[in-house]
Amino acid sequence: MREHYGEEAGQSVDDVDWLIEIADREWIGFCKDAAIKRNEGERETVIARGARLFVVPRADVSAAEVASRFTNNLAAITEAAAEPGPFIYSVQLTRIERLL
């Protein structure tokens, strides 16, 4: 988000707006968001827009662990990312798990 919106602006972008943008641009989203599977507005946006999202489901993990989860699961992420949306995958330590 920092690269697209800039450091300061990226911090204030609403999650639903970000999800709409990544879906409309056919980007794949990567984030850490423990609440996404419970947030009805975000979930509905993913479905309605056909978003493709990989989520580390714990907001309290370090940047190093987030990077490790993504790199440990790179082959599975690459395979899943080739599919059309909508989808949300939870990125665990050694596997990905489809949530939506």
Image (spheres, rainbow, N blue to C red):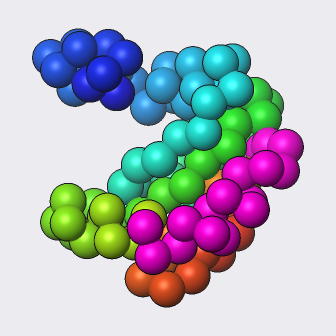
Taking depth in this image into account, of 63 and 56 the one nearest to the observer is: 63
**Residue 35 vs residue 88, the one in the foreground:** 88
Q: Residue at x 80, y 43 (%)?
A: 85
Split into 4 quadrants, where in the image is the C terminus?
A: bottom right
Can residue 86 be seen here? The reply is yes
Is residue 44 a member of the stretch shown in magenta?
Answer: no
For the point 74% across and 60% down, the residue is 80
Q: Is residue 16 above or below residue 90?
A: above
| Lateral position of residue 1 relative to residue 44, left or right | left
Residue segment shown in magenta: 71-86
Return the residue found at the far right: 84
Q: Where is residue 15 shown, x and y percent of the image? A: 44, 31
> Vertical placement of 75 versus 37: above or below?
below
**Residue 20's x, y, as percent?**
61, 22
Q: Is residue 44 visible?
A: no
Farthest-out residue, bottom: 94
Q: Quadrant of the N terminus?
A: top left
Percent of width and height locating residue 13 = 34, 20
Q: Work out whether residue 6 or residue 42 is closer to the camera in this orientation and state it.
A: 6
Q: Residue at x 83, y 50 (%)?
A: 83
**The quadrant where residue 26 appears:** top right
